[in-house]
Amino acid sequence: MSADDPWPREPGLDHLVRALTAEPTAAELAGQDAALKMFRANRRRRRHHAPFAYRIGVAAAVATVAAGVAAAAYVAVLPAPAQHAADDLVDRIVADMHHHHHHHHHGARPAGQHPATPLPSPPSQPTVAAPVQLVLTAARPQIVAGTDDVLSGQLADAPGVPVQLFERLGGQSNWRLVGRTVTGSGGDVTLTVPNLTTNASFRLADAGGSMSEPVLITVVPTVTIDLASGPQPHTGVVTANALFAEPGDIVILQSLSGGAWHGVSEQRVDQDHLAAFTVPVPGPGVRAYRVVLPATAAHASSVSGPVQAR
């Protein structure tokens, strides 16, 4: 055997090749009519389904099988080396026919091939746990300025977790850390906010990034007034003390007349939270005075008690 001549130099194999390429004998053609009849019947049934190339392949396969029948007689009498080579040649021809036949029959499986094992269904998406919720409430949403309030926090079923308390003062945008604690056996915490003198929002946060909704506590400054004699006869001075009001906050003086409160004048409180009003005493039809502190970003509104105008 060489690169130019791939066939083994065996006399018996030469006989096989000549037999495969020679014209068929009368004995070899004995079953030709039956084979062609079967092939044509099969061709009529499948001509609307099988592609042209496939029909040509079937015809070629029939011719190859016929040649293989004739070759079998020669193979049986070849010397051993040529016998093996011829066996390999015939096996390749038959295997190639078998491969093409099943390639075009999509529903068939080659012998010995097991049905494909169905792939397992992909696992469903894991359920994403809801983020841990921190809850914060105030014992009193509104308090008197300068007093304490109590905040209660809850981190459900999370005992021993460090949490921080943040505060944002009224009228400001920044949060500042004002306290730390650890959740109790039920995940609860209690924090006291002492001496709160301005509106403030609070929220709890844990180390994992969970944060409660803000809780607003408003403060009500205490406003008191005093009526004293004025510098002139039949005059009086009403002095208002708006403790915890911001310097520059406006206070409004009102008088009680005809069963209703009416605005008389307004002033701004000074650095000492004081504002003074001169009023006639006794005023015509006036029975009492009071001072109102309107609400601001820093505090809620507040009203003083009345003083009698004598």
Image (spheres, rainbow, N blue to C red):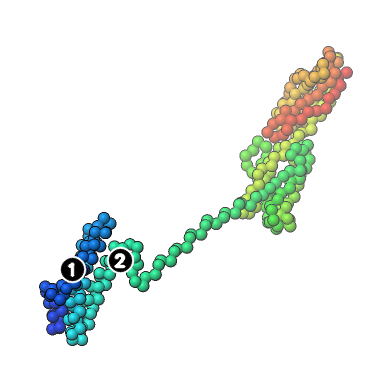
Residue found at x 84% / y 14%:
285
Q: Position of residue 162 (x, y in %)?
A: 68, 55
Name the mark on residue 102: 2
Q: Residue at x 18, y 85 (%)?
A: 77
Q: Decide: marks 1, 2 in contact (CB < 8 A)?
A: no
Report crowding for label 2: few under 14, some 14 to 19, many 20 or more residues within 10 A (C-alpha): some
Residue in the image at 28% along x and 70% along y: 98
- Residue 47 in the image: above or below residue 285: below
Residue at 74 percent across and 43 percent down: it is 138
Residue 210's label in the rendered image is none
User: Which labelled disc corresponds to residue 33?
Assistant: 1
Residue 177 visible (yes or no): no
- The amino acid marked with disc number 1 is Asp
Q: Residues within 10 Å of mark 1 (few under 14, many from 20)?
A: few
Q: Is residue 91 left or right of residue 5?
A: right
Between 148 and 136, the one lying in front of the other is 136
Secondary element at tag 1: helix
Using the numbered discs, state the Cα–Cα distance from disc 1 to disc 2 in whole angstroms: 25 Å
Q: Nearer the viewer, residue 30 or 102?
A: 30
Q: Position of residue 5 (x, y in %)?
A: 14, 76
Residue type (three-letter) at the residue carrying disc 2: His
Q: Is residue 138 above or below residue 306?
A: below
Q: Report the quarter where the C terminus lies.
A: top right
Q: Position of residue 253 (x, y in %)?
A: 77, 22
Q: Position of residue 305 (x, y in %)?
A: 83, 27
Task: Give residue 203's quadrant in the image.
Answer: top right
Left or right: 154, with 26 as reference point: right
Task: Give the SS element for disc 2.
Answer: helix
